Image (spheres, rainbow, N blue to C red):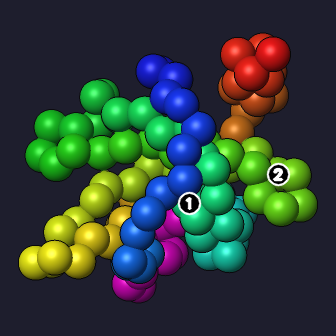
Amino acid sequence: MHHGRQQPVSLVRIEWDDGNREKCQKHGVSIAEIEDVLRGRPRIAPDLKHSATEQRLIAIGRTPAGRSIFVAFTIRQYGDEMSIRPISARSMHRKEVASCEHQDS
């Protein structure tokens, strides 16, 4: 995984429908937690392994409660409006959290 810089994501909206809402919540991550991470200061990196049909990105960050979350997403452009469409989300594994904390120090 490539490790990006922490940066705020400027976006108009986060795009939800029955398909991505259900898939994102499948691993025990709430919609609110996903939106907190995406609207916070996540690390963002390209997801080269899963970008064959569309550009996918990875965001990793913490919720206000301190939970470390991994979110795969794509960016959609509708005219002048941009939205983020989450594809899947999960809690980060201990090794992933440790790796991020090591890079931050």
Residue 69: in magenta span: no
Numbered tag placed on residue 67 in the rendering? 2
Q: Crowding at label 2, few (<14), some or many (≥20) Cα neighbours within 10 Å? A: some
Q: Can residue 38 be seen in this view?
A: yes
26 displayed left or right of 33: left
Residue at the spot 59% in from the left edge and 38% down from the top edge: 6
Query: Tag 1, which secondary structure?
Result: helix
Can you say which quadrant of the picture contains the C terminus?
top right
The residue to which callout 1 is attached is 38
Against 89, residue 31 (above or below) is: below
* Residue 74: x %, y % from top left: 31, 56
8 displayed left or right of 55: right
Quadrant for residue 34, please give it: bottom right
Q: Main secondary structure of the magenta part?
A: helix
Against 32, residue 51 (above or below) is: above
Q: What residue type is labelled 1?
A: Leu
Residue 22: in magenta span: yes
* Residue 45: x %, y % from top left: 43, 33
The residue range painted magenta reads 16-24
Q: What residue type is labelled 2?
A: Arg
Q: Which of marks 2 and 1 is in front?
A: 1
Residue at the spot 64% in from the left edge and 58% down from the top edge: 40
Against 60, residue 26 (above or below) is: below
61 displayed left or right of 10: right
Q: Crowding at label 1, few (<14), some or many (≥20) Cα neighbours within 10 Å? A: many
* Residue 62: x %, y % from top left: 75, 50
Q: Which of 20 and 5 is in front in this view?
A: 5
